[in-house]
Amino acid sequence: MICSSDFIDKTTSIMHIYADGLTGLDKNSGIFGFPKKTILSALNLIPYYIQHNVCLHLSNTFEDYGILQIEKNIKAGCKFIIDGGSEITTIAGPFISDIHSISSIGLTTMELDLDQYAGYWVSVFDKPLRTIQKNNINVITPVRHYDSDPGPVAFNIVKPKTTLHANSGYSKLLFSLTGQGTFCLQRLCFSGNNSNWSIDRLNTGTANSYVSHIITTDTTMSDTVFGMSLLYGGLTDPNTFVQKSDITDGFCGVSKLNGQLSFYWPRAVFAFGCYVKSMKYNNGSLTLNNIAQGTRIKQLYLNNANGVGSGYENAIQNTEGYATTSIGGGTYGINLSNRSTLQIGSGVDVSNCSSHAIRVEDSRLILNGIITGDENIGAGIYANNNSTIELKEGYIPTITGNIGDLSFDGITEASTWNNINNVKRVIDSNELSLCKITTNLL
């Protein structure tokens, strides 16, 4: 169903529309204090041509909200925001920390399962919200460091209170946006087996699409993005339409706890401060620092995707002041196929894979620095079927696995990184694949 105004085709002033899944009524006007009941009825108040700043404010839970295809044209300089508000729901806590630093918070007696709360948010007293990149038995690592050691303080595990839930029927926010303005989707939880979101189409002229502070908890269906988008940790103020501070107002990217987050024909898709179970780039280009700022991805796939910049920029990169950018925890950490290319910056970690840490098939991989990784069941890197691995001269990676450092057959070690650093290249004539030292990296 296409959502658009029945009577007016363009905005005439700034708009604030409200919908409340608990207390709203569809006969209400949709202004503050008189919210609509359904997202559809609220969207129908917003004209197709957005020529002023517009925010749709959502609150509480929307059950089985339906498939909503949201088609809007956003004028240059204008913003269209869908915001779930600042209220949060506590999942666990409060705890009082006796383990704390600028990069972690914890309690000796917590006894958590590994990554039990990864992808949710940690709320620390007197500190901004952070996405949880990982947790062990008693320590939580946020995606971004705090400005100072929090000390022994109360902390909670939380998620957005505003929830779009669907179990009995398929429900989805499907965005088809054009124009040269900015779209922001932020502070929402998608829960249930049949609830998700997708940016189906962004016109090539659309300036920016920001997705932030989003958690998808249950569904194994893919959340998808076509074209250009920024998945990042910051917020836009839904009342003033001004960008908030990443330092003082929280840093929570997109969390996809199950299923896959897929990008199709990406031109510039960035993942900052995110936790994603599975991410796939299809038929497009990654640019400088696409995956950075504390992001953790359990499985990353590139299919016919270019992840090497024209100036040899890194597509995956560590960022100072954030947790280590990490891949791994699934079958492969990174899987390149169908003539994909990827360049990874120094310090990125690829660990804890049930097979090879990185698989390269008919593709090219550049390690632009010391890439780390351990506890991988297969090899550190498995390259086959006309693949090329390039190592930056003087920077010996430490990524490895039970099979060894590098394998061309997926069963035995072909060479160690130290040996390749000495002999400069190793070739496998059966797989038409090679690993070599290269000097033309920045």
Image (spheres, rainbow, N blue to C red):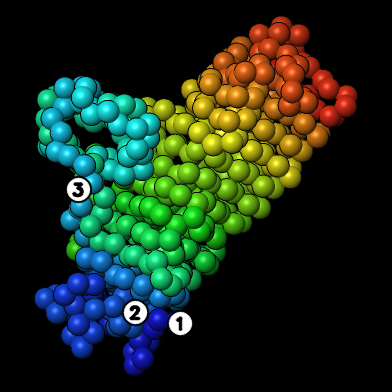
Q: Residues within 10 Å of mark 2 (few under 14, many from 20)?
A: many
Q: CA distance from mark 2 to mark 1?
A: 9 Å
What's the amino acid at mark 3?
Thr
The answer to whether the residues at label 2 and label 1 have Cβ atoms under 8 Å apart is yes
* Viewer-side residue, 234 vs 383: 383
Residue drawn at point x = 67 percent, y = 33 percent: 359
Residue 27 lies, in percent from the top left, at 20, 88
What's the amino acid at mark 2?
Leu
Please give the label number shown on residue 1: 1
Q: CA distance from mark 3 to mark 1?
A: 34 Å
Q: Earlier in the sequence, mark 3 or mark 1?
A: 1
Q: Earlier in the sequence, mark 2 or mark 1?
A: 1
Q: Is residue 178 above or below residue 323?
A: below
Residue drawn at point x = 56 percent, y = 41 percent: 300
- Quadrant in which the N terminus appears: bottom left
- In the rendered image, is residue 279 in sight? yes
Circle 2 is placed at which residue position?
A: 40
Please give the label number shown on residue 90: 3
Q: Residues within 10 Å of mark 1 (few under 14, many from 20)?
A: few
